[in-house]
Image (cartoon, rainbow, N blue to C red):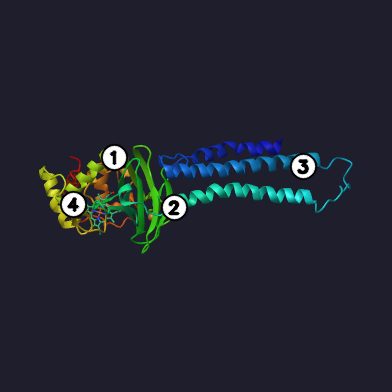
Amino acid sequence: MKKWRHTLKFLPLFLVALMLSGCGKEGVSALKPEGDVAKEQASLMLVSLLIMVVVVLVVGFLFTYAIIKYRKRPGQEDYIPKQVEGNKKLELTWTIIPIILLCILAVPTITKTFALSDNNASKKSDVLKIKVTGHQFWWQFDYPDQKITTAQDLYIPVGKKVEFDITSKDLIHAFWVPALGGKQDANPGQTTHLWLKADKEGTYKGRCAELCGSSHALMYFNVKAVSNDEFKNWVKDMKAGTKSSPNKPETASAKQGEEIFKNNCMSCHAVGDKGGQIGPNLTNFADRENIGGFEKHTKGEVKKWIKDPESIKPGAKMPKFDKKLSDDQINALADYLFTLSVKQ
Ligand code: HEC
Ligand SMILES: [Cu+2]
């Protein structure tokens, strides 16, 4: 009893650990599927889990039964039971049962693996193609047929098959949207493929699933699944925003911010069709859900970001501007960045 009490002391700790294991970014769960691929994968996991649970229960029962029934009893200290080896029936039984279980598992696993990796060969009109490029520590999304480039927020239409061609600019990342299924390596100099489909409108959290440096765990992005019409409108607005600068800055401060942006930021960031490709394309920055894929999307946070990106995202490949620009200049920049909306 004393020993038990000792173990019981750790019970609360164990329960807390168990509860915390369910924590994490909202929507990052492969067990809450919201699309065809994710549903098939979740059902595969359930089948395997079910078989494993049955095995554990049966083996556990036999094990407990055996240790209770054949335990050493007082007065039998020297007793050695009859030794049995090579019972053909038993040996066959416990060899054949696992083989049958593995066959049951193999059928759905193999068929679904092939069906789900059906590698981006669909007819052009039935699917949306998106090129995904992983960077330390952000995601670039190009829509080759629509001629649109964006970052951090990935727009897809609900109910349509989306085929991704995935690559990386620097080292190995992995593209993963748990609620929609998948997980695919993003390798430099190589293109990998994945397709996904969202059933329901909503924003799903995506993330990098391959350790890629200090901010690997912050390499989040948002998947915005919208209706077909909304998607068409977004494409139209993005195209218009890419040709001309998006909404023109109107206030004096935002206009000043635009000048500062041209002189300090354009070498890395594009707005519309002008600017560099080293950092995220900011054409629709004001429409984003987050800064850097996870931070609150407010002017205050943007100012902090410009002053010292690494204070928000350690290892971020953007220089600090706290010494180069004054507070007024950074205010103006923030005002300008928040005019970068393509929404009409
Ligand atoms: C040397 C290249 C470089 C320069 C110059 C640069 N940036 Fe960046 N910027 C980046 C990179 C790279 C990222 C992505 C960092 C990450 O998320 O890991 C970034 C991210 C950002 C983001 C977050 C974008 C998003 O959607 O999450 C903002 C806002 C931003 N930069 C604004 C600016 C402003 C304003 C300036 C000029 C004062 C500037 N940047 C200058 C490289 C640069
Ligand atoms: Cu990564």
Residue 139 makes an appearance in the image: no
Q: Mark 3 belongs to which amino acid?
A: Ala
Circles 1 and 2 in contact, beta carbons < 8 Å = no
Number of marks: 4
Q: How crowded is mark 4: few (under 14 residues within 10 Å), some or many (20 or more)?
A: many
The residue sitting at the bottom extreme is 189
Q: How far apart are marks 3 and 2 (CA)?
A: 46 Å
- Residue denoted by label 2: 117
Q: Mark 1 belongs to which amino acid?
A: Asn
- Residue denoted by label 1: 228
Q: Which one is in front, 288 or 48?
A: 48
Q: How far apart are marks 3 and 4 (CA)?
A: 73 Å
**Which quadrant holds the N terminus?**
top right
- The residue depicted at 88 percent of the width and 43 percent of the height is 76
Residue 253 appears in which quarter of the rendering?
Answer: top left
Residue 225 appears in which quarter of the rendering?
Answer: top left
Label 1 residue near ligand 1, CB within 8 Å = no
